[in-house]
């Protein structure tokens, strides 16, 4: 494991700063690292050598031109060949486990449909997939840095206990403790584990591995499915709020009068107007839930009700995004989750509504589809482990706190 108590806090912060700079500015030279960090060249030289030895970094061996005067300084990039991350998503009716490199390349990926009635059985299935992923990483000589798990519900920001997964009926679960017991019983190595909300995880997938990673600017990622959640990214990383509830946008109220009753007990929540359930309701006229596949098949046949339903969802989604833009002023708003599969059929009415509800002097954020499709939450959970390694603030104790056996 790269970060242990052998490193003083200050040295660790310097290492994190170097990794972060190389990640966000691939090809950066040692001299530029010294300038950017304010550290002297010999300190940077030692840190870079350590990180090369530990396979965090690699040197860009672009040869100096033969004719050439002036030797090009050796650039540094993240080394995607040795260190790996595990990510998992516990969905409402599936479990996804993947492994990826620290550069975001997927090395293993498996999704199992499952019934969530029995929590113990679900965790057993999760462990089985994780063990499989682990063995494959071992065979490929990858060193696993940690495991991130995305869950559809509320997670306590301080101790990472699951407060509630309403759609699974799981409440007050010490998942890290459960995993620790399973890992020990299977003689699996101890690694840091982090648990986070699925919308937050999906947002991290964009921030850590997506095209926006080099811009380091504010981003909001909406996960649109049966529920609706938002992950909020600031220039410094994920914003979880005072106790982890930030981004619960699905239960902000758009239609307090004459609104439909939401699963949370309130009326007219965003989820009742902008979700798979809302679209199904628009198509069938009752509470029957249609699958995304079924809705897409109807759309492919030019079903008017689906088109009208998507226009209605886009209408309200445009208002939601307008409110988000007014409060947070993000550079980019990413639409992800199952509903994002409707692509332009959803984005076009959304942007139209955003503009129609916007006054003068307002700049439209970039509104785009998620790059990572149905893997976004699992990939983002893996990214959460990486961001603990590359964000130079407050990470060492956090990692120790949640490490399985530390
Ligand atoms: Zn609600």
Image (tube, grey):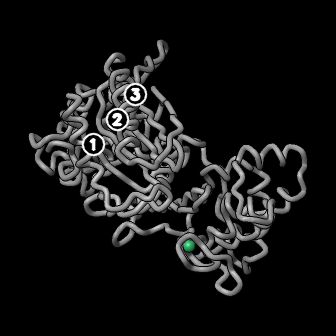
From the top left corner, tell me how far across and down residue 110 is, in percent.
49, 30
CB contact under 8 Å: marks 3 and 2: no
- Give above or below for 136 relative to 281: above
Q: In the rendered image, which quarter contains the C terminus?
A: top left
| Position of residue 321 in the picture relative to residue 100 (left or right) | right
CB contact under 8 Å: marks 2 and 1: yes
Q: Can see residue 129? A: yes
Question: Which residue lies at the image location 29% right of the left edge and 42% below the top edge?
Answer: 18
Question: Quick one: SS at disc 2?
Answer: helix
Q: Which residue is mark 3?
A: 80
| Position of residue 155 in the picture relative to residue 376 (left or right) | left
Q: In the rendered image, which quarter contains the N terminus?
A: top left
Of tags 3 and 1, which is closer to the observer?
Answer: 1
Nearer to the camera, 195 or 16: 195
Sort mark 2 into few (<14), some (14-19) or many (20+) by Cα contacts within 10 Å: some
Question: Quick one: SS at disc 3?
Answer: loop
Q: Which residue is mark 1?
A: 179
Q: Ligand 1: give its quadrant.
A: bottom right
| Position of residue 162 in the picture relative to residue 349 (left or right) | left
Q: Can see residue 20? A: no
Whether disc 1's CB lies below 8 Å from ligand 1 is answered: no
Sort mark 1 into few (<14), some (14-19) or many (20+) by Cα contacts within 10 Å: some
Question: Which residue lies at the image location 60% right of the left edge and 71% below the top edge?
Answer: 325
* Separation (CA) of disc 3 from disc 1: 27 Å
* Separation (CA) of disc 3 from disc 2: 25 Å
* Separation (CA) of disc 2 from disc 1: 8 Å
Q: Which residue is mark 2?
A: 127
């Amino acid at each position: 494991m790269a970060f242990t108590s052998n490193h003083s806090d200050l040295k660790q912060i310097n290492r994190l700063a170097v990794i972060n700079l190389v990640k966000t500015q691939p090809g950066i030279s040692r001299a530029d690292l010294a300038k950017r960090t304010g550290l002297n060249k010999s300190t940077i030289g030692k840190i870079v050598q350590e990180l090369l030895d530990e396979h965090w970094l690699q040197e860009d061996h672009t040869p100096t031109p033969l004719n050439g005067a002036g030797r090009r300084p050796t650039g540094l990039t993240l080394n995607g060949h040795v260190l790996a991350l595990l990510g998992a998503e516990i969905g409402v009716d599936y479990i996804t486990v993947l492994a990826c490199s620290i550069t975001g390349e997927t090395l293993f990926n498996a999704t199992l449909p499952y019934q969530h009635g029995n929590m113990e059985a679900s965790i057993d299935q999760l462990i089985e997939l994780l063990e499989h992923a682990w063995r494959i990483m071992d065979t490929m000589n990858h060193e696993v840095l940690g495991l991130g798990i995305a869950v559809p519900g509320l997670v306590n920001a301080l101790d990472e206990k699951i407060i509630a997964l309403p759609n699974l009926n799981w409440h007050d679960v010490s998942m890290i403790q459960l995993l620790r017991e399973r890992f020990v019983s299977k003689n699996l190595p101890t690694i840091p584990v982090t648990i986070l909300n699925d919308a937050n995880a999906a947002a991290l997938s964009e921030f850590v591995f997506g095209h926006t990673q080099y811009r380091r600017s504010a981003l909001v990622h909406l996960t649109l499915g049966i529920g609706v959640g938002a992950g909020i990214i600031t220039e410094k990383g994920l914003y979880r709020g005072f106790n982890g509830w930030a981004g619960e946008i699905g239960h902000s109220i758009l239609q307090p009068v004459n609104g439909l009753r939401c699963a949370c007990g309130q009326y007219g929540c965003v989820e009742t107007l902008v979700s798979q359930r809302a679209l199904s309701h628009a198509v069938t006229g009752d509470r029957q839930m249609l699958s995304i596949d079924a809705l897409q098949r109807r759309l492919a046949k030019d079903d008017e009700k689906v088109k009208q339903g998507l226009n209605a969802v886009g209408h309200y989604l445009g208002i939601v995004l307008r409110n988000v833009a007014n409060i947070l002023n993000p550079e980019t708003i990413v639409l992800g989750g199952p509903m994002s599969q409707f692509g332009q059929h959803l984005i076009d009415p959304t942007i139209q509504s955003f503009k129609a509800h916007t006054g003068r002097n307002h700049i439209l954020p970039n509104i785009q589809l998620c790059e990572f499709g149905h893997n976004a939450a699992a990939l983002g959970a893996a990214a959460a482990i990486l961001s603990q390694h590359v964000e130079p603030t407050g990470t060492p104790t956090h990692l120790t706190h949640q490490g399985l056996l530390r």
